[in-house]
Amino acid sequence: MAQKYDKYNKSGLVRRTLPYILKNKTKIILCVLFAVTIAVLTTITPRFTKSIIDDYIVSDLTNKEKYNGVIKLLTLYGVFTVIVVVLRYLQNYLLNLVGMNIERSIREDAILKVNHLQVDYFSLEPDGKIVSKITSDSNGVRTYFNVMFSICNAFVNLIAVYIGMIALMWQLALIILVIAPIILVWITFYRKKVHSYYTDLRETSSRITGKLNELISGALIIQAFNQEEYMLGDYKDLVNDYNHQDKRVNTISIYFGFELLIFIKRLVEAGILIYFGWTYFNVAGVVVTAGLITTFTNYVDRIVNPINTIFNNLNELEDSMVAANRVYMFIDEPDDVRVFDGKKAPLDIVGDVEFKNVHFSYVKDHEILHGIDLHVKAGQTVGIVGHTGSGKSSLMNLLLQYNVTDSGQILVDGNNIEEYNKMDYRRHCGIVLQTPALFAGTLKSNVTMEREFSDSDVENVLREVGAGYIIDKDPLGIYQPVTFKGENMSLGEKQLIAFARILLRNPKILVLDEATANIDSDTEMKIKHAMNIVTKGRTTFIIAHRLSTIKDADKIIVLDGGLIKGEGSHEELYRDCPIYKDMYDSQYQAINNKKLTYST
């Protein structure tokens, strides 16, 4: 599990993030200049303390000279401090702007990727995890940038302070350099240990988001079947896993965290005092003064602070690296290339469709369709029936180019559709699903799908498919609000809106996928009327479980196990195709049993 998100190593993540950073090049250059200036100024200021102590407080100068000298140095100290405060404010302001710009760019690329992904991706990846990658993990890239800049800034401060120590007393500076390997080993061990923990933590967090999405979207079904405790149990298990993993991260932070750093600092300070004491306050001709000791211990603090900054950022660094890996892997998912490439489809088509020896599989060596041969003339209505898993929807997905064939050809007007640009080709296709997708907006925006049509055009198509009553029931008419997923509409109303949407688009090839499933008889009559309207002059494929809805089709195809087992009219199939006869008789018997139940 942990290795799944290790596509980019440290240098790979830097290279992957660099294009987003370079979009803010001017701001970054200013931040770097501010960081160097701050590091230099904060390295100089401890020297003022040394000078105040050694040159004035413990000197033989007169009180007035001491006072004037101290005031002068304190004034310089104050000016330097004000400059540092102003530069830090500007630096933080610019860094926040850059971070927000990076996160916005990542989210824009992620949203674009959603529109260009292959359809199979959405079948394999839960919605909640996709949302988590676009929102939470894109924020992780911003955190990654901020943490990396903070660590680089800490290294700049370390270098500046160490140069100041060498200038002050190079002998002791070299001795302090001995702690560098200890700190390096410590940080390396910590990073390796905590990386796997954060990978698991991010994956579990993503699964929690997915489970929440499942709980919310399926709330009605969960309550209807009294499964609240069971589903809540699954959620609690995930939360417990997250808490356990978080506890492991916190444990290692406690054992190898700030307290260990303070311990190392105390050892260094003790070493300094022992060194000065051992050398009798005279080191190779350099007289050790109170100001020198004070300044040197101040420098030790200033060395420890950047190290502490680096360490405190290690947790966020590992977490943000995992998050950045996840969102970059999402953005780097292969595009459905023919959304962009391919030949331009004709401006107008007739709608003659032919499947020639079509084979297809979702997973290699597990074929779904086995050599489908089918010819549908332009303007014909074809019913496609079969048991669940027979390949009905898979066949239509190929026609709509949501998937591509393993072998064979699908021809429209004699041309192979797999050579066309998909977006261009789909202008000639329309689909109405069992549960139509509606979006938050207005009735008009859901019919037009944000394309330019007049109010009268929208109202006409709605009335033509029998949805005029939807307009009339609200004073706002076609501007009445439609809530998220069309929750304020009945299933039948959603279907009618979907038919109006198709009629307005006016495609030559139409697929109706279980369009009359899960609706009552009264609504079915409205849907049948709408179907009769939208199928006129179009090559129409109707996937149906209710065989009564396709009795009048020009021909009916019976699929079973990925093979065509029957083709013809209702009468011909009822006479010659046992599968169709059994399906029809079963439904007819079920309808009679229902009528008998109601009458008694």
Image (cartoon, helix red, strand yellow):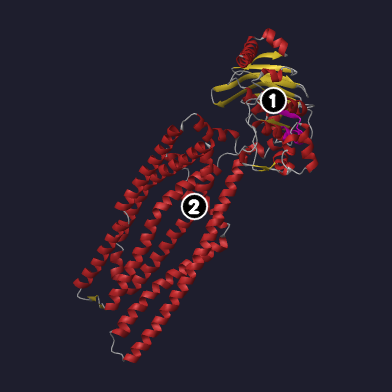
Relative to 515, is 61 on the left or the right? Answer: left
Q: Is residue 507 magenta?
A: yes
267 or 569, which is in the foreground? 569
What is the quadrant of residue 134 in the picture? top right
Give the number of marks.
2
Magenta residues, as a range?
499-510
- Dividing the image into 4 quarters, which one contains the C terminus? top right
First in residue order: circle 1 vs circle 2: 2
Relative to 121, is 176 on the left or the right? Answer: left
Q: Position of residue 70 (x, y in %)?
A: 36, 84
- Which residue position is annotated with label 2? 14
In the displayed image of the protein, which residue is found farthest to the top?
575
- Dividing the image into 4 quarters, which one contains the N terminus? top left
423 or 292, which is in the foreground? 423
Q: Is residue 304 above or below residue 226?
A: below
What is the secondary structure assignment of the residue under circle 2?
helix
Q: Is residue 369 above or below residue 28?
A: above
The answer to whether residue 245 of the structure is visible from this angle is yes
Mark 2 is surrounded, within 10 Å at the Cα level, by few (under 14), some (14 to 19) or many (20 or more) other residues, namely some
Identified at 59% across, 49% down, the residue is 108
Q: Position of residue 456 (x, y in %)?
A: 80, 41
28 or 143, which is in the foreground? 143
Which label number is shown at residue 503? none
Q: Position of residue 258 (x, y in %)?
A: 32, 58
What is the secondary structure assignment of the residue under circle 1?
helix
Q: Position of residue 180 (x, y in %)?
A: 32, 60
Pointer 1 and pointer 2: residues touching (CB < 8 Å)? no
- Which residue position is annotated with label 1? 522
Q: Depth-wise, is mark 1 or mark 2 nearer the camera?
A: 1
Relative to 32, is 288 on the left or the right? Answer: left
Q: Amino acid at mark 2?
A: Val
